[in-house]
């Protein structure tokens, strides 16, 4: 009887032992192993793509304000003491699309420039007859298309990027009738050249969920004429760019 009991007990223990041998031991954590968190590739790409926007040659849109004013822009007048035109009220405003032609790995390269600019010009002078003179004002609107090219060098001191540009500016001058002359509607083909510095501060990276933003300053010189009226003059411009 004892032998039968021992045989039954041994038979019951065999499956449990086999199951215990079949289980894999859970590996113990190595306390010396470095701690790492796996970041999805998509999140890494989003974090770095904004910094590479300019190097990849994406299109930028530039909004600029310039203190340009012509040195000796005048119109025919039959009255004495009439001043030359100067910028009136708001500075010259421009909106320019900057698209890549060829961009190198170091960030330098060539770009197209295309856009529009606007500035209001005004002059004052004496008008009237020999018996009665009064001060008259004439206002003209100068609207220009912007067609040109730009070269950007490598970034200096990891801070700012110099650039130079040249533009053809087909221009249209129009104004209402004034005490000095009849309504004005004239075309011209002046040129504009400039140079400046471009910076990309951290607070403009990925602005509005778009690409990098940039700030810049430049000086430019416009030359040429509209209906024999000279547009020659210097300007200092500040601008902001958004890369799309």
Image: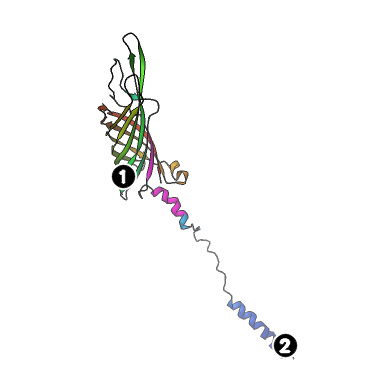
Residue 58 among those drawn in magenta:
yes
Q: Nearer the viewer, mark 2 or mark 1?
A: 1
Mark 1 surroundings: few (<14), some (14-19) or many (≥20) residues within 10 A: many
Quarter placement of the N terminus: bottom right
Marks 2 and 1 sit apart, C-alpha to C-alpha, by 95 Å
Which one is in front, 75 or 158?
75
Circle 2 SS class = helix
Which one is in front, 233 or 19?
233
Write down the residue under mark 2: 5
Q: Quadrant of residue 159?
A: top left
Mark sitting earlier along the chain (2/1): 2
Which one is in front, 11 or 122?
122
Can you give x and y, in whole percent of width and height, for residue 64 in the image? 38, 35
Which one is in front, 25 or 67?
67
Identify the magenta region.
Answer: 43-67
Can you give x and y, in whole percent of width and height, for residue 163 in the image? 31, 40
Identify whether 85 is placed above or below 154. above
Can you give x and y, in whole percent of width and height, for residue 88 in the image? 37, 25
Q: Residue at x 40, y 48 (%)?
A: 51
Can you give x and y, in whole percent of width and height, for residue 218 in the image? 33, 34
Number of the label disc, if any, that sits on residue 111:
1
Circle 1 SS class = strand
């Amino acid at each position: 009887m004892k032998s039968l009991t021992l045989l039954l007990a041994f038979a019951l223990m065999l499956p449990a032992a086999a199951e215990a041998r079949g289980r894999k031991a859970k590996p113990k954590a190595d306390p010396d192993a470095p701690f790492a968190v796996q970041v999805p590739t998509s999140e890494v790409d989003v974090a770095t793509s904004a910094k590479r926007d300019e190097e990849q040659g994406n299109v930028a849109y530039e909004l600029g304000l310039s203190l340009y004013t012509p040195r000796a822009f005048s119109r025919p007048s039959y009255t004495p003491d009439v001043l030359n035109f100067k910028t009136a009220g708001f500075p010259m405003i421009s909106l320019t699309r900057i698209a890549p032609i060829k961009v190198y790995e170091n960030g330098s390269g060539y770009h197209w420039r295309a856009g529009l600019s606007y500035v209001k010009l005004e002059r004052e002078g004496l008008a009237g007859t020999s018996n009665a003179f009064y001060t008259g004002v004439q206002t003209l609107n100068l609207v220009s298309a912007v067609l040109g090219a730009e070269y950007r060098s490598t970034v200096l001191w990891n801070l700012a990027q110099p650039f130079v540009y040249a533009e053809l500016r087909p221009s249209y001058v129009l104004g209402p009738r004034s005490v000095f002359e009849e309504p004005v509607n004239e075309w011209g083909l002046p040129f504009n050249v400039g140079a400046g510095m471009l910076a990309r501060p951290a607070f403009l990276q990925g602005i509005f969920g778009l690409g990098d933003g940039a700030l810049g300053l430049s000086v430019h010189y416009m030359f040429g004429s509209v209906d024999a009226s000279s547009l020659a003059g210097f300007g200092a411009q500040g601008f902001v760019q958004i890369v799309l």
